[in-house]
Image (cartoon, helix red, strand yellow):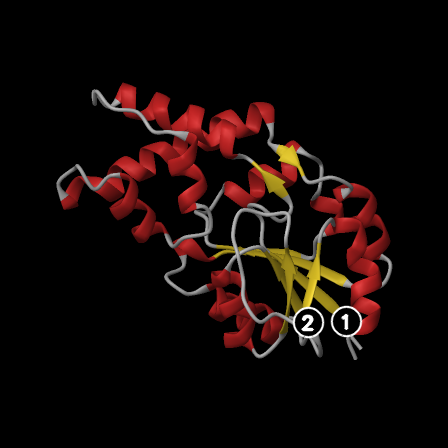
Amino acid sequence: MVDSIIFDLDGTLWDSSEEVLKAWNEAIEEAGYDFSLSMETIGSIMGLPIQDIANKVFAMLPEEKRLPMLRKCFDKEVVILGETGGRLMEGLEETLQILQKKYRLFIVSNCQDGYVQTFLKAHHMEQFFVDFLCVGDEGITKGEGNRKLIQQYDLKQAVYVGDTTGDQQSAKEAGIDFIFARFGFGTAKNYLYSIDYLAQLPEILDEIV
């Protein structure tokens, strides 16, 4: 029987892409560069490791300037998201209220430290989650982050809910079941379980033994 749920954040619990795009373009302008990013670019990097994001988004910059520029973008996005929040996935709070009664809830994201905290505080979600990991700043994979939480909290049968092949791989690395959020940003293959909206999650969990 499932006893805990580990969630991805972007594309699974919320969509912050519009706010992120605004923040990153402001940071780029403030840094004195004469280019800007598109929504398509932001969508293409959601869920990627931090260094991969830097190399993809700022490929036009010298390698030594890519990660520092990305850090400036991160700093700006935390400020803007702290003020506005993002777009919560439909039915999020109601679904979390149901799930919390039966399962322990966690978040593991590839993001930088401060990003998950912004989601939790901006939308008053701290009450639902036992803990979270921002693995982007820990130098570990999502799969290793999943294992870390499983060991730390002695989770007997966790599942991972996410929207990308990277999320699927992270569940495989941790030896836990994966539930594909089909409404998110990415794709997955050969999954056993999927949801088209969050409210389906309690029913799907009852099917996992």
Q: Quadrant of the N terminus?
A: bottom right
Instruction: Name the residue located 80 percent from the left edge and 55 percent from the top edge.
Output: 200
User: Is 199 on the left-hand or right-hand side of 135?
Assistant: right
User: Is 80 on the left-hand or right-hand side of 67?
Assistant: right
Q: Dividing the picture into quarters, in which one does residue 148 lie?
A: bottom right
Per the model, the C-alpha gap separating discs 2 and 1 is 6 Å
Q: Mark 2 or mark 1: name the one nearer the start of the chain.
A: 1
Q: Nearer the viewer, residue 184 or 70?
A: 184
Instruction: Name the residue located 61 percent from the left edge and 73 percent from the top edge.
Output: 150
Give the residue at mark 2. 158
* Vertical position of residue 185 compared to residue 163: above or below: above
Please provide percent x and percent y for residue 205.
79, 67
Instruction: Name the residue located 37 percent from the left edge and 61 percent from the top edge.
Output: 139
Please provide percent x and percent y for residue 209.
79, 80
Give the residue at mark 1. 3
Q: Secondary structure at mark 1?
A: loop
